[in-house]
Image (cartoon, coloured by chain):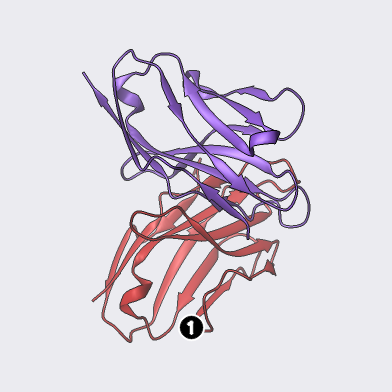
């Protein structure tokens, strides 16, 4: 596809359940980012991958959150023991790399924990 | 602490009127500066960015922004607003080295356009 693709677009889960959110970056983009956007707020950085490795995970709120990018393309954000406070839109972005390259954002996954 | 402030949560302008959205930042050193737009159900789209050089930068859709170092500001402007400009606008800053994709966003300004 031409852009960053995120699936599912919407996810409703029960408190305490495990969820996985998927991000397909633009082909060839080596850098991948996850952000979280709560209602009425701007996006907040969660984690950054350069290739397969998590180069910066300083934004992950706690150890219930984990992300992988095993082959350097698709990434999965995993949330264990979901809480109602995890409800937000989770955004993924990718970029070609390089310190002035633009990050392209996907449409996000809206997660609702009930 | 590093932060971005967008003082106006909601702005309403008439179609054809001029627009200015304010952005102030607090950062250890001069960061990279960005403006993004988000329409309902859409991802963030980059309007413009400032890295260096001319402090007045031009972006897409007729938008421009001016970086003022002395005021730590990066205000977004458009001379004549169109109804299709109604959306949420985010100012963001990022580091010039290291993880340059680690952006700090403001809380956003919602723009409503009256016919």
Measuring from the top left, give residue A73's x and y in whole percent. 61, 59
Measuring from the top left, give residue A58's x and y in whole percent. 63, 71
Q: Nearer the viewer, residue A62 or A18?
A: A62
Q: Nearer the viewer, residue A9 or B111?
A: B111
Chain with purple colouring: B
**A68 relative to B53 in the view: left or right:** left
Q: Pointer 1: what residue?
A: A64
Instruction: Specify the quadrant of the image occupied by residue A101.
Output: top right
Q: In the rendered view, would you say A31 is above or below A101?
A: below
Residue at the (32%, 30%) spot, across then down = B86
Instruction: Specify the quadrant of the image occupied by residue A11.
Output: bottom left
**A85 relative to A72 in the view: left or right:** left
Instruction: Specify the quadrant of the image occupied by residue A45.
Output: bottom right
Chain with red colouring: A
The chain letter for the residue carrying disc 1 is A
Q: Looking at the image, which residue sits at the far left?
A: B115
**A34 relative to A72 in the view: left or right:** left
Q: Looking at the image, which residue sits at the far front?
A: B70
**Quadrant assignment for the C terminus of chain A:** bottom left
Measuring from the top left, give residue B26's x and y in whole percent. 63, 50
Q: In the rendered view, would you say A94 is above or below B14?
A: below
Measuring from the top left, give residue B15's x and y in whole percent. 29, 16
Q: Secondary structure at mark 1?
A: loop
**A53 relative to B5 in the view: left or right:** right
């Amino acid at each position: 596809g031409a852009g960053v693709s995120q699936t599912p677009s919407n996810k409703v889960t029960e408190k305490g359940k495990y969820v996985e959110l998927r991000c397909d970056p633009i082909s060839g983009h080596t850098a991948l980012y996850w952000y979280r956007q709560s209602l009425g707020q701007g996006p907040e950085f969660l984690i950054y991958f350069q290739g397969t490795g998590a180069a910066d995970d300083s934004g992950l709120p706690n150890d219930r959150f984990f992300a992988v990018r095993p082959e350097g393309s698709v990434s999965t954000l995993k949330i264990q023991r979901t809480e109602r406070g995890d409800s937000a839109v989770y955004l993924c972005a990718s970029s070609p790399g390089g310190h002035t390259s633009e990050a392209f954002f996907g449409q996000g996954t809206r997660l609702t924990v009930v | 602490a590093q932060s971005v402030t967008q003082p106006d949560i909601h702005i309403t302008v008439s179609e054809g009127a001029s627009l200015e959205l304010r952005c102030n930042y607090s950062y250890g050193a001069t960061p990279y500066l960005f403006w993004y737009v988000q329409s309902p159900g859409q991802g963030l789209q980059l309007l413009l960015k400032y890295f260096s050089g001319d402090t007045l930068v031009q972006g897409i859709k007729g938008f421009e922004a001016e970086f003022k170092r002395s005021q730590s500001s990066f205000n977004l402007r458009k001379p004549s607003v169109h109804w299709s400009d109604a959306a949420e606008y985010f100012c963001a800053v990022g580091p010039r080295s290291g993880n340059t994709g680690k952006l700090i966003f403001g809380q956003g300004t919602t723009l409503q356009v009256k016919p």
